[in-house]
Amino acid sequence: MPIKNPVVANDRTYPAPKTCAIAICLDGCEPEYLEVAIAEGLMPTLKRIRETGTDRLAHSVIPSFTNPNNMSIATGRPPAVHGICGNFLYEPETGQEVMMNDVRFLRAPTVFSKFYEAGARVAVVTAKDKLRALLGAGLKFDEDRAIAFSSERSGDTTKAEHGIDKASDWLGMPVPEVYSADLSEFVFAAGVKLLKEWKPDVMYLSTTDYIQHKFAPDEQGAKDFYAMFDRYLTELDAMGAAIVVTADHGMKPKHDANGDPAVIYVQDLFDDWLGKDAARVILPITDPYVVHHGALGSFATVYLPNGCVVSEIMDKLAKIDGILTVRDQHQAKREYDLPADRIGHIVIISDENMTLGTSADRHDLSGLKEPLRSHGGLTEQEVPFIVNRVIDLPNAPTLRNFDAFFYATTAAALEEVPA
């Protein structure tokens, strides 16, 4: 039975949906990808939805990386609230650099868990398994009201841990290769089957940005991806779901005129200035899947040794060509809604065509077969926000990608539900 009352999650009130409320996160979807694909006639359904529904641009959270933005969408709040401010972090108390994909790092409940507590049926399908535990936090799988799994590990799912046994067999598709468009297509195909057969009240579909790292908007690989997505969107829309299409971040070219990666190696700078390893540079883009970006993004944090004059270091960094902005811990917390205890002493953001690395000898770029495309900074903050209903929406920067479920449930609560 559909839930009857609004649901409160992290001090936001979400309307009770009358039809399935779906948020789709197209990882790395720079708005230009949609413009090109629509202009070439490859996305007729999305073109129609933009014309007959609501079409806006929104801002992602900073850093414009996968985990912070997915968890902002999942909680309806910025990283200062939920605590996930990167894919990767340094823990000063342990001296360890670790992946931030453990539920212990999450400081707020997800919208999904609150809807589940209210009696809703909740489905979450994500491409990479690094996000699955965080997105599924607070769900229970013993009442046939929650399903949460990744394409990457779809061959190993169990009813007890994911709400479904062997999802790849259930879907009739093989477990996809991680570095492929198939990983995202599996997400869309699973979403269609779940909506048709399992009928969730709330569903989240989150893809991977392998294609967006590899292909520019006007290249064939990107066009094929968005044409594929539009076919699945057609099916979801036809079943009457209220759908918000957004992204976790954009994507920009980060290479020089010769096609070589454009990089400022920040750890090398600090080693020259302060002595080897006196400072510690952290790249929150780092995750187990670095083939397509070499752990190079446009956002870095720095932990400084005792006795450093932070303002002097910031002044030196600000003079380097390719660095867009430098903020101390307190400025970054205030301006970017970040948790101060997880971002070091300094935050560095590079410009549209530059990335930040640690040391030159610590980045394996052998997997980069195409000119580098990446994200993480302010220039990748603009993302699409498209709803297949007519609703009242602000524009960016007021509209944020993490408003997705608020507006998806708002749209799903409308009296008039199209056939």
Image (spheres, rainbow, N blue to C red):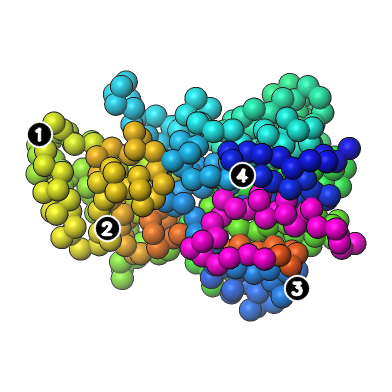
Please report whichever mark, 3 or 2, sits nearer to the chain's N-terminal start.
3
- Comparing marks 4 and 3, which lies closer to the viewer? 4
The residue indicated by pointer 1 is 307
Residue 309 is drawn in which quadrant? top left
The residue indicated by pointer 4 is 12
Please report whichever mark, 4 or 3, sits nearer to the chain's N-terminal start.
4
Please report whichever mark, 2 or 1, sits nearer to the chain's N-terminal start.
1
Dot label at residue 52: 3
Does residue 9 appear to the left or right of 314 in the view shown? right
Tag 3 secondary structure: helix
Up/down of 237 relative to 65, above or below: below
Crowd class of label 2 (few under 14; some 14 to 19; many from 20; radius 10 Å): some
Q: CA distance from mark 3 to mark 1?
A: 59 Å
Q: Which residue is rendered at x = 59% and y = 73% of the image?
A: 35
Q: CA distance from mark 1 to mark 4?
A: 42 Å
Residue 25: where, in percent of width, then height?
61, 52
Residue 50 is drawn in which quadrant? bottom right
Dot label at residue 210: none
Dot label at residue 325: 2
